[in-house]
Image (spheres, grey):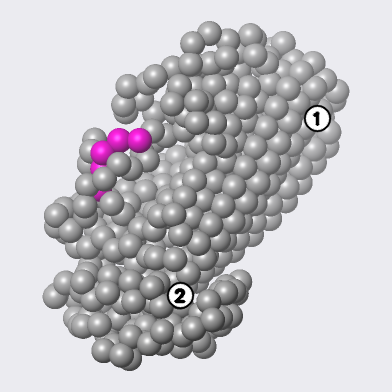
Amino acid sequence: MNLIFSTAIILVIAAAGCACPPHKMTATAATCNVRDFGATGDGTNEDTVAFQKALDACAISGGGFVVVPAGKYLIGSVQIGNRTILRLEKDSIIMGSPDLNDYPMMDVRWEGRWQPGRRALIYSANVDDTGIIGPGRIQGNAAVAAPQNPRGVVVLEPMNCKRVRWEGFTVTQGGNWATHPTFCTDVLIENVHIVGGRDGIDVDSCKRVRIEHCDIDTGDDSISLKSGRGLDGARLGKPTEDVVITRCVLHGRRFACIGIGSETSGGIRNIRIEHCKLASRTFGIYVKTRIGRAGVIENIAGKDLDILAGGFLKINLTSAGNLNTEDDPVEGLPGFPLGRNFSFSEIRAANCSKLVDAREISPRRPLEGLSLVNISGHCKQGISLANMSGVRLSGIRVNGCTGPLLSLTNVQGSGLVASK
């Protein structure tokens, strides 16, 4: 992805020898080097000031690349500006500082609502054409990540940005969410490797997101799609929409590979998951929310998926999701989340714990449309559905089930007879 700049003048920061290109940026464009701004890269002395100076110089010059050469760079929170790409060269490692004072307090988005918290290790807000490219590594620090209220430090957090690009680097998260794009449009996350104990990518009220060729091994959801929580999220009404997750290898060691929720109050729609390998402790795809969170979850499609561990699909629209902070529920029937138009095909299960568990759906707001087509393999438990209309089952060929392949309560549709 190239970035096109309209500025006609190249400004040179003479003291640092930095010429940031204002026109078409390529991988070989002139850039700002953090070492020219005083970064030592010795892993001991803090390089926060040098990093911020390089990032700012590049942004005010019209944009370009900020290069991080090989070395270990200890930094606190820094902010990426407009039309600026951070380029991590081979054997470069950015290490988050263990000092909370290196991460300013601000209003942050956390589990679907705004509250006080620490600024991310690498943060951007209200800018365009920004991102990070590899092949280096970014390491969050567990000492500053863990607090929930106020929120601790996440690693990467672009806020209200347009055209965000992350490509070809590694993130170790350090005990909190690894990455959290929020209110962003046109996001590309490609060939990124994420390892840690919490969520890998939390897409929060974003539009047009593509996640491809990523390898994510996390203790919680590998990828989570969110859109606000309770009355505040419903009032803002900012959905996560038009998301493609493709050709990824995902391992949710403690929870799901792809979590849709549990903050869904602004809506989740137009999600496509394809050509992925999923191994989880619970389910490869887990749609989770609860009564009072409102929101419509619609047009969720999965195709050509390998389920290597755990179950395949869980849908809970009544009672799932965290209660770490007090809810502000949407009252009455409008607070009941609605699922609509879910479609999955060409699913291969290897020693699957449960194929589909979709029973926690209120009869007051049934799920409208579920298609399961061409699903094969070995599963210990089959398909359990409740309170749905417009269901289509076809080509369900699995073996190894203990108990019935199909368990149905208040379900209308076609193909509602077990087949092998």
Where, by quadrant of the figure, is residue 391 drawn? top right
Q: Residue at x 35, y 80 (%)?
A: 68
- Of residue 116 and residue 389, the one placed in the foreground of this image is 116
Reply yes or no: does residue 295 show up in magenta.
no
Looking at the image, is 338 positioned above or below residue 225?
above
Q: Give the left or right position of residue 45, taking residue 134 as reference.
A: left
Residue in the picture at 37% in, 65% down: 80
Of residues 1 and 390, which is closer to you in this image? Answer: 1
State the image quarter where residue 410 is shown: top right
User: Which residue matches tag 2?
Assistant: 63
Return the disc, 2 or 1, that comes first in the chain's sequence: 2
Q: Does the magenta stretch include residue 117?
A: yes
Q: Nearer the viewer, residue 321 or 402?
A: 321
Q: Which quarter of the rendered picture does the C terminus lie within?
A: top right
- Judge from the rendering whether residue 186 lies leftward or rightward of residue 79; answer left or right: right
Mark 2 burial class by Cα count in 10 Å: few <14, some 14-19, many 20+: many
Q: Residues within 10 Å of mark 1 (few under 14, many from 20)?
A: many
On residue 393, the disc is: 1
The reply to whether residue 402 is in sight is no
Query: What's the residue at 59%, 47% (across, down)?
Result: 207
Q: What residue type is labelled 1?
A: Leu
Between residue 104 and residue 314, name the one nearer to us. Answer: 104
Q: What stretch is highlighted in magenta?
A: 114-118
Residue 29 percent location from the top left of the image: 50, 86
